[in-house]
Amino acid sequence: MSNYFYIIWIPLLPLITFLVLGIFGRKYVKGMAGTIGSLSLLGSTGLSLVAANQYFFVDGKVNGIYQKIIAFKYTWLEFSPNVSIDISVLIDPISVMMLVVVTFVSLMVHLFSLGYMKGEERFATYYAFLSLFTFSMLGLVLSGNIFQIYMFWELVGVSSFLLIGYYFDKPSAVAASKKAFIVTRFADLGFLIGILVLAFYGKTLDIGTLIERLTSLQSPEFISITGAGFLGVSVLTWGLTLVFIGGAGKSAMFPLHIWLPDAMEGPTPVSALIHAATMVVAGVYLVARLFPVFSMDQTSLDIVTYVGAFSALLAAIIACTQTDIKRVLAYSTMSQIGYMMFALGVSKQGGEAGLGYMASMFHLFTHAFFKSLLFLGAGAVIHMVHSNEMKDMGGLRKLMPVTHIAFLIGCLAIAGLPPFAGFFSKEEILLSAFQSNKIIFGIALFTAALTAFYMFRLYFSIFWSREATGHHGSHSEGTVSMKFPLVILAICAVAAGFVPFSHFITSDGVALETHMNIGFSVAPVVLSLLAIALAAIMYKTANDKPAKVAAAFSGVYRAASRKFYMDELYLFITQKIIFPLIGQPIAWIDKHIVDGLMNALASITAVFANLIKGIQSGKVQSYALYFFGGIAALAILFIYVWK
Amino acid sequence: MSSIPLTHILSVSTALFCIGMYGLFTRRNMITMLMAIELMLNSVNINFVAFNKYLYPDKLDGIFFTLFIITIAAAEAAVAIAIIINLYRSHNSIDVEDAAEMKL
């Protein structure tokens, strides 16, 4: 076993950057902040590539199985000899894969931001927050202890909150950051309870031990957790479902997805990093991390499957009607994460049946590249036209050639056309769905076609639709630091699909041989092509067809463009039901009963004190009198009463 | 020998004790109060000697206690007078009512 200790520097470098920029950034290194942040992240990226190379190609494999390696472990808080919160670095295929994805996308976003955020008042603060986020996300993926995951989970939540609310003078951004924080916090409550349930029965917080105990049918922990029931469902199902609620909150799964579209109020590179490529897949990562345990319980896997599939479909329908380009991308993110979720849900542990697990991780990998590419491309467009609305765009292909090509590659990748990255991962997902559940497969296929449609609606609306009007002409496409990440990510969006992913990451660490099934791929590709053609007819030139279609489906269209009234529903539930029926009675109890008890206690004490304070006169002789009086009383008591 | 009964001696000591107590309660002069305390101690001494003599004539426990009390009373008087002198130096008075800084 070789030494992986250097991996600890991968998260520590951004942490140091965060401290340096956070403390000295505003005064001393203001102009340098971007360079410092990018350089330190370059170091992290280099180290993670070295680690990935070492792990996947040199010594991660023992007897054909990728090992779980604990590179570093420090016991932080010990509750009992077996239950402790450790700060540890766990290396296994998915954590190494996530290391590469997170550092790489983060590096691209750092570079892009050099141009995009230039001249901002709080430039150094922005980079400090980005570094904090990168540190937290890396800490999350390396966690070997479930409670450590929870700690970093909250840290990414905080950095996401800070970055969404970066433009804190905009009321909508402030509201969005609060919404994101509260919704994910609410979900994290489920996560915490889930952790406690699993840890209580598993008698450990260490992930490796937990998985070991809860996956062997004979272990006393497994027997006790499946034997115990609550409301007619086994406690294992409860624990896993609660953990999944936490993951669903972070990953914007229905019905906790409402924060993600609003989170687009943050700067666009932030959306690319946090709300597309890394943080929102934390929920998928969490389910994958605990997948061996999930695979022991069919009910919770079914929940994962159906929530994922429903979210994928719902988000795709909503995305077809949105006009803000970042919101279209946000819903498409939600839809793609839905794909990853149900791919996990239909998977089994180990061997050929573990295809869904591998497909989900593969899609996570490719999605990170093409979605951050799309977001950064959208960022470049927004940078140029100073608007998020589709109607302000159109005909930009001649003005922004690099962005145009990069965005087109991103769209083709997400639409799942060969030979782009999305094709390979989506095929695997569709195949695993086809093998286990035909209903899910139908939903997935329909969603894939919808995805192609709304992505090309977006593409044609931005870059075609009408001829470019002169007023953008003076503006150039953006600095080299903005174009460079687009080019790199576009290359990745093509190349990532050719990674023989199943050789590296499978549910049981054994390489899996997958083969392209040409016949199977025909249907999704043809459907996607048809959807693209439809989008081309409707949006390539300005015409009245979209309006006619919208009118024909006016009810559905209106509901979808209002996001199926989810926000209204939440407002109704909170303001009309929870506040008056639960909040106000509790407030009354707090004010009158809890406070009243305390006040009563205080006033009784005060009255009593007033009564007896006369005795303490300060006169020595009266004290002597009390003393003798007391002795006399005791004497009488002992002589005449208690004989 | 057996002419004086025990009750007579106890009456004397009780009277002495009550006089001491009365003095302690009524006098404001600390020297007088100290004297009153000495009276009370001596009434206790009388009790010890008397009970020793009348109840256990062949033992000396009561006498020993009396000697102890006399010794401790001497030490206590020395400490008390030292306190009174210091009080007099700081307050120019040996009236108990005058040392009232700690009072509310």
Image (tube, rainbow, N blue to C red):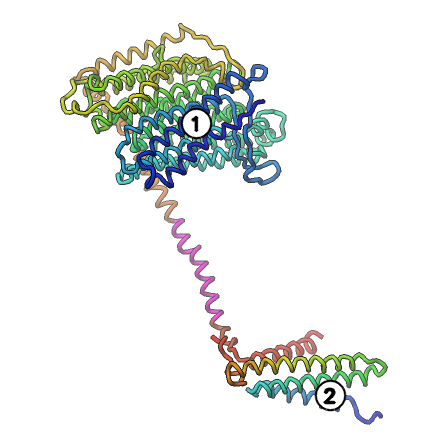
Placement of A599 over or under A353, stated as above or below: below
Residue A605 is a magenta residue: yes
Q: Residues within 10 Å of mark 1 (few under 14, many from 20)?
A: many
Q: Closest to the observer: A82 or A531?
A: A82
Label 2: which secondary element: helix
Query: Horizontally, is A424 left or right of A31 in the view?
Result: right
The range drawn in magenta is A585-609
Placement of A422 over or under A563, stated as above or below: above
Mark 2 vs mark 1: give the one in front: 1
Query: Horizontally, is A604 left or right of B47 in the view?
Result: left
Location of residue A70 by image quarter: top right
Label 1: which secondary element: helix
| Residue A110, horizontal then vertical, whole percent | 35, 28
- Rendered image: mark on residue B10: 2
Placement of A211 over or under A175, stated as above or below: above
Which residue is rendered at x = 35% and y = 35% of the image? A180
| Residue A58, horizontal then vertical, whole percent | 53, 17
Image quadrant for the N terminus of chain A? top right
Location of residue A620 by image quarter: bottom right
Image quadrant for the C terminus of chain A? bottom right
Q: Chain of mark 2?
A: B
Query: Horizontally, is A229 left or right of A391 in the view?
Result: right
- Rendered image: mark on residue A44: 1
